[in-house]
Amino acid sequence: MNSFRTTTIFEKNITAYNNNERLIINKGGTRSSKTYSILQLLFLIAIKSKKPLIISVVSYALPHLKLGAMRDFEKIIQSYGLIPEKMKNISESYFKVGLSTIEFFGVDNLGKVHGPERDILYINECNYIKSYDIIRQLMVRTRGSIFMDYNPSREFWIDTEIIGQRECNIIHSTNLENEYLTYEQIKEIESNKHN
C-alpha cells in the first residue's frame, strides 16, 4: 500500500458494514468524503473477499459516474499500489478486484434495473434519481448492504420512503470530517455557504 489514507467517514461506514447494517445512508455536504470513503470500503471488501462478489455502483447516468466515482475509484486503486488499467474493462464500465466485479452503470430508466442481482449496492448521489420505483427494484435485487449518499438540499423519496420507514444507519458528514482537504478548498466551501 502506498497512500491508502482514510477519513472518519470511512471508519463510520466500515463499522456500519461490519455490523451487518442493510441500509447505510451518507448524508452530507460537498467534499465531506462520502463518495470516496464508500468507494474505498467497496474496494477493500472486494479485494479481501474469498468468494466472488458483484458490487454495483449506480447513479442517474453513466457519464456522471465516469466523471466522478470512476475517477475516484481509479485513484483508490493507485493508492493501494495497483494499476487501474489492468483491472478495468473500459467498454463495459467495470473493474475486476480480486475475485470480485465492481460495475458502474446509470439508472436513467426502469428497464436498466430489472434482472441483474448483486451482493452490495451503492447509489451515488441518490437525490438525482427521480423515481423511487428504480430504487425499489435495485434494492429488491441486492442480497447484502446498500449504501446511499446525497447532499441534503431538498426533500425527496429518501425522506418519505426510507428514513423513518425502514431501519437504517444514517451517517452525517461535513467537510470538517475530511482531514485531507486543503486550506483553499475549505475556504472555497465556506464562502459558498454565504451565497
Image: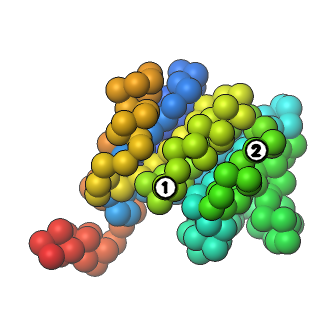
Can you give x and y, in whole percent of width and height, for residue 31 in the image?
A: 38, 63
Q: Is residue 124 visible?
A: yes
Crowd tier of the residue under label 1, counting other residues whose Cα lies within 10 Å: few below 14, some 14–19, many 20 or above: some
- Amino acid type at mark 2: His
**The disc label shown at residue 102, or none:** none
- Residue that badge 2 annotates: 114
| Quadrant location of the C terminus in the rendered image | bottom left
Q: Residue 114 at what x, y percent from top left?
A: 76, 44
Given the current orientation, which residue lies at the most extreme left position? 194
Callout 2: SS: loop
The location of residue 6, given as percent across then percent down, is 49, 50
Indicate whether 90 appears above or below 30. below
149 relative to 62 in the view: left or right = left
Is 159 or 83 nearer to us in this picture?
A: 159
Q: Residue at x 81, y 42 (%)?
A: 115
The residue lying at 87 percent from left, 43 percent from top is 99
Please name the residue that numbered disc 1 is placed on. Answer: 130
- Disc 1 is placed on an element classified as loop
For the residue pair 159 and 109, the one nearer the viewer reads as 109
Identity of the residue drawn at 66% across and 67% down = 62
Between 5 and 26, the one lying in front of the other is 26
Looking at the picture, how far across and down is residue 123, in whole percent?
Answer: 56, 49
Tell me the crowding category of disc 2: few under 14, some 14 to 19, or many 20 or more residues within 10 angstroms, Cα based.
few
The N terminus lies in quadrant: bottom right
Is 109 left or right of 172, judged from the image as shown? right
Q: Is residue 5 something one can see in this rendering? A: no
Q: Earlier in the sequence, mark 1 or mark 2?
A: 2
Compute the Cα span from label 1 to label 2: 17 Å
Quadrant in the picture for residue 194 = bottom left
Q: Is 185 drawn above or below residue 104 in the view shown? A: below
